[in-house]
Image: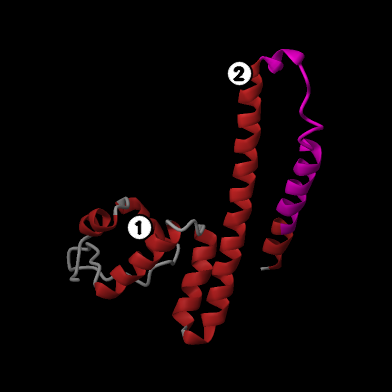
Amino acid sequence: MSCLTITEVSKKYGINANTVRYYERIGLLPPVPRQANGNRYYDDGIQGWIEMIVCLRHSGVPVEALYDYTEMVRVGDSTLQAREDLLIEQERELVAQQASLQRSIDRLRHKISLYKNGEIKANKSYFEEYKIASEIAADNKKKQEFRDKDKQF
């Protein structure tokens, strides 16, 4: 690797230059050196940070969790277990999202099958069958727990 401009970094990693600036502004990247004319230049070390961020973002890690992760990386090896724990939690969240998406896909497929076999004309309500009310309540509870957890920090 060598020193690259923001345009070159953007092209190399397939991300928008504004995204690179955003990552710098919110503290995901270490301070980016500038040339005499004010242009940023990204050395090997910063490109390594960008690669890590891009890989984790493409793994579904949200920016908020990524911020915590990068802070731990800066601290060093004493945070290895905490970083692993953070990634395990992110995996759990993605698996929960996957299950929710699969449930939605299954329901839509069922509804489509009702059209195909003509049962849709029966005007049956699936609100109770699918237990939508209890799922909404559970989702709201999870959201509230997340907000409460977020307030602790």
Q: Nearer the viewer, residue 7 or 85?
A: 85
Residue pictured at 52% horizontal, 87% vertical: 78
Report if residue 129 lies within the magenta region. yes
Residue under label 2, please give it: 116
Q: What is the x, y in percent for residue 20?
A: 34, 58
Alpha carbons under labels 1 and 2: distance apart? 51 Å
Q: Position of residue 111 (x, y in %)?
A: 65, 26
Q: Residue 55: percent from the left, percent from the top?
A: 39, 62
Up the image or down, 81 lies above or below 60; here it is below
Going by the image, does 41 lie left or right of 87?
left
Picture quadrant where residue 23 is located? bottom left
**134 magenta-colored:** yes
Q: Earlier in the sequence, mark 1 or mark 2?
A: 1
Q: Residues within 10 Å of mark 1 (few under 14, many from 20)?
A: some
Identify the amino acid type marked 1.
Answer: Arg
Residue at point 22%, 62% (across, down): 39
**Image height of 71 relative to 16, above or below:** below
In the picture, measured across the screen, residue 29 lies left or right of residue 89, that is left
Identify the image quadrant of the N terminus.
bottom left
Q: Is residue 57 above or below residue 81?
A: above
**Which of label 1 and label 2 is nearer to you?**
2
Magenta: main secondary structure equals: helix
SS class, disc 2: helix
The type of colouring in the image is: secondary structure
In this rendering, position of residue 72 left or right of residue 53: right
Span shown in magenta: 118-145
Give the side of residue 54 with respect to residue 113, left or right.
left
Residue at image mark 1: 21
